[in-house]
Image (tube, rainbow, N blue to C red):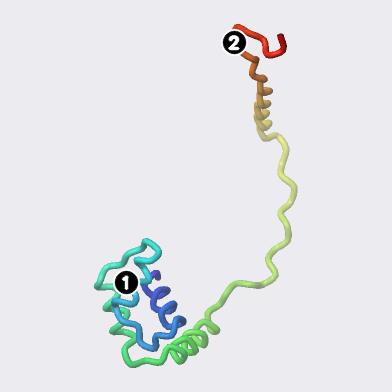
Amino acid sequence: MKVVAAYLLAVLGGKTSPSAADITSILDSVGASADDASISKLLSELEGKDLAELMAEGTAKLASVPSGGGGGGGGGGGGGGGGAAAAPEPEPEPEEEEEEEDMGFSLFD
């Protein structure tokens, strides 16, 4: 995913056909890395294709994917009694104030 994201960032930056060096420099700028095989695979898959058309095709494919929905069921009934009582949480201990250390003299003498 980070290789695809770097490719898309390069396109947004004005590169119509980003190179492997462009993708690597973007990833390096954020401290990420990717192997050369994944970069070259992405570039070979996208070579000669229009990115806007690919994204439009992908959006059309996603429209046919069910995405859940439906009203959902009603809430569950009340729990049955007789379960073990929850263990009480321990109360936090009050913080003790630090006592002033006697330094051998008083500031107000």
In depth, the one of 43 and 17 nearer the eye is 17
Is 104 situated above or below 73?
A: above
Above or below for 28 versus 94: below
The residue most toward the top is: 104
Q: Residue furthest front?
A: 109
- The residue located at (56%, 77%) in the rendering is 66
Tell me what residue is drawn at x 45 percent, y 92 percent: 53
Which residue: 59% across, 10% down?
103
Residue where numbered disc 1 is placed: 24
Q: Cα distance, mark 1 to mark 2?
A: 61 Å
Helix or strand or loop: what does disc 2 sit on? loop
Looking at the image, which is closer to me, 27 or 108?
108
**Which amino acid, by three-letter code, is at mark 1?**
Thr
Q: Mark 2 points at which residue?
A: 103
Residue 99 on image: x %, y %: 65, 15
Residue at 73% from the left image edge and 61% from the top image edge: 74
Instruction: List x then y, in percent, for residue 94.
Output: 68, 23
Rendering quarter of residue 87: top right
Q: Which amino acid does label 2 sit on?
A: Met
* Badge 2 density bin: few <14, some 14–19, many ≥20, Cα 10 Å: few
Q: Which of 17 and 51 is in front in this view?
A: 17
Quarter assignment of residue 68: bottom right
